[in-house]
Image (tube, rainbow, N blue to C red):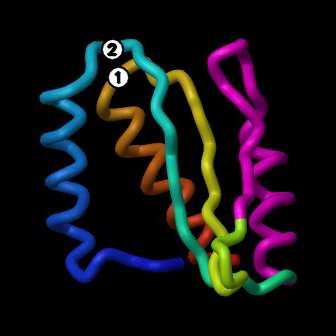
Amino acid sequence: MDTPSNPESFYINLKDKLYDTASWPSEYLYKFIIKSNPSKVNKIESAIEIQIKPVNKIENEPTFVPNTNGTKIKIKIKKLAANKKLVLEKNANFRSLIIKL
């Protein structure tokens, strides 16, 4: 998974943006970019689909979109979040799931 050069400042910046730009509950689009490795992509796709089921019309199934040269895959997951804290927790959970696999 591509990681920001400074993950701590990335999450501080994300937290600040969440507090400044959204009213809650709100939908949130999680995005992750990973290197294109078919085995890892299949494992991640299976794990995410097991853990994340859409519960309403706002939410969607995870999408996996390759970049133009096929070296990376963008994972997008839209979820309804009750508050900013849950967005940050879920982001950390998705990220650790992707890193583990």
Q: Quadrant of residue 3?
A: bottom left
Find out whether residue 42 is within the magenta segment: yes
* Marks 2 and 1, the one that precedes in the sequence: 2
Amino acid type, label 2: Trp
Q: Residue at horizontal 71%, vertical 61%?
A: 65
Describe residue 77's horizontal placement relative to residue 91 as left or right: right
Asked if labels 1 and 2 touch by Cβ distance under 8 angstroms, the answer is: yes
Please tell me whether mark 2 sits on a helix, a strand or a loop: loop
- Give the vertical position of 15 relative to 92 (above or below): above
Circle 2 residue: 24
Image x and y of residue 6, in percent: 21, 77
Find out whether residue 92 is within the magenta segment: no
Q: Which mark is residue 83?
A: 1
Where, quadrant-wise, is the C terminus in this rendering?
bottom right
Image x and y of residue 36, in percent: 71, 82
Amino acid type, label 1: Asn
Please tell me whether mark 1 sits on a helix, a strand or a loop: loop
What's drawn in magenta, residue-wise?
39-65
Q: Quadrant of residue 99?
A: bottom right
Find the distance from the CA under tag 2 to the CA under tag 1.
Answer: 5 Å
